[in-house]
Image (cartoon, rainbow, N blue to C red):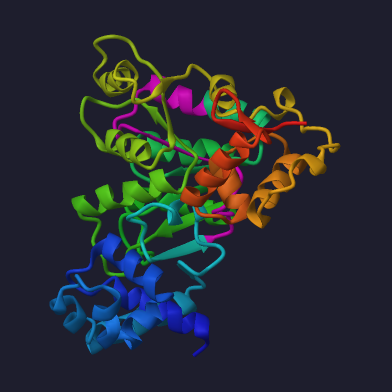
Amino acid sequence: MTSDEEEQLYSIALTMIPGIGHIGAKRLVAETGSAESVFHNRKALSDIFPDINQRVVDALDCPQAIARAEQELDFIQKKNIRCLTFTDNDYPSRLRECEDAPVVLFFKGNANLNSLHIINMVGTRHATDYGTQICASFLRDLKTLCPDVLVVSGLAYGIDIHAHREALANELPTVGVLAHGLDRIYPHVHRKTAIDMLENGGLLTEFLTETNPDRHNFVSRNRIVAGMCDATIVIESAEKGGSLITAELAEGYQRDCFAFPGRLGDEYSIGCNQLIRDNKASLILSAADFVSAMGWNIASHPAQPENVQRSLFLELSEEEQKVINILEKQGNLQINTLVVEADIPVQKMSALLFELEMKGVIRVLTGGMYQLLN
C-alpha cells in the first residue's frame, strides 16, 4: 500500500471513530500532520492535546474501523472514485479552510474542485416556473460573462436539479454534493442527469457507501456546498428550508450570498425576500449583477501594468511577494481566489493582505477585490 493509500485508509477510519466529530478530526490531523499519525501516535495524543478525553484516545484503538475503511478503499478503487484527503492537492482549498471541513471526500468526475470561479445555486424543492426560468437565463448569461465557472448544487428536486441541467445545457461543469455514498443516486429519477454530470463535472460526498440519505445528512451536506464555493445564490425559498441553512453557513464561512427577489405573498419567495431584507444576502436580478458584484468582470478590471516599482517594496516576505506576483499576472482578485492561487490559508492570507495594504502595495476595491498599485 502506498503512502497516499495509507493516508486515505486512516482518514476514512477517522470518520468512524465516535466522540471526535468533524472539528475534532480536522484538529487532530492538523496538529499531528496526518490521519495516519493520529492512529500510530494514539498513546502520545494526550501530550499534544492535554484536554483530550481519554475515551477518544481509547476509541482510536479500533480494528473494526480500519477493516471498514479497507472495505471502502477497495470499493472506490474498483469504481475509479477519487479519495481526497486534506493532504491531497485536489481537495477543495476553499473548503479546507472551514473549521468543520470533512477530513476525507469521495469524488467521481472530471471537474476542477479548485476552479478560479465556483458558485452554488440552491433553492426550494418545489420550484415554480419563475424559479426554473431564473436558472435558465442566469446560467445562459453567466456562460457568456464567466465561461470558466463551476456550478455546484445538491442534486435534489427543484432548483438543485434545474441548476445542474441548465449548467450542462450551457456546457458549464457542474458538481452535485450528495447526502449519501457513491453506491447510489438519490433521488433515483435524477440518475440520468448524474451520469451526464460525470462527463462535465462530477459527484462529491463525504459519506461512505451504504449510508442512507437521512435528513441530518442533508444538513451536513450543505456545509460542503457552502464551503467549497465563492458565493451562494438562492433562487426561491419558502420561509424555512435547506437553502436558507446553506445561506447561513455561507455567511459563517465569510462567503458572499445572493438572492433573487420574488413577488410579495408568493410562498416560495418568502425566504429570499427575508434574506435580502435582513441583509443576509445581496439582491441580484441577473448574471450581470452577480458578476459585477463579485468583481469577476475582467473587462472592467484590466490587469495592472508590469512596471511595478519593486525598489519601493524592500521589506516583503516571500509570501507577500507571491501575492504581488499573482495580482500582477492576473489583475484584481478576491481573497478566495488568492487563497487558491497562492495555496496560503485564508487566515494567513487575510494578515498578508492587511500588511500589504498598510505598506501601500495594494488597495481594496468594491466587491472585496484587491488591486495592485503602481
Where is residue 306 drawn, in percent x and y? 84, 38
Q: Which portion, as a residue range, is magenta? A: 109-136
Residue sitting at 29 percent across and 27 percent down? 237
Q: Classify 54 as above or below 172.
A: below
Q: Is residue 260 visible?
A: yes
Q: Classify 356 as above or below 17.
A: above
Residue sitting at 24 percent across and 34 percent down? 241
Q: Classify 9 as above or below 22.
A: below
Where is residue 84 drawn, in percent x and y? 47, 67
Q: Residue furthest right?
A: 307
- Residue 236 counted in the magenta span: no
Q: Residue furthest top?
A: 264
**Front-most of residues 374 and 288:** 374
Q: Is residue 150 visible?
A: no
The quadrant holding residue 116 is top right
Q: Classify 365 as above or below 109.
A: above
Residue sitting at 41 percent across and 38 percent down? 254
The quadrant holding residue 292 is top right
Where is residue 176 drawn, in percent x and y? 44, 50
Is 371 on the left-hand or right-hand side of 184? right
**Front-most of residues 361 and 28:** 361
**Front-most of residues 52 and 149:** 52
In which quadrant of the rendered image does the C terminus lie?
top right
Is 191 on the left-hand or right-hand side of 307? left
Is 71 on the left-hand or right-hand side of 151? left
**Front-most of residues 132 and 279:** 279
The quadrant holding residue 65 is bottom left
Residue sitting at 56 percent across and 55 percent down? 344
Q: Residue furthest left?
A: 55
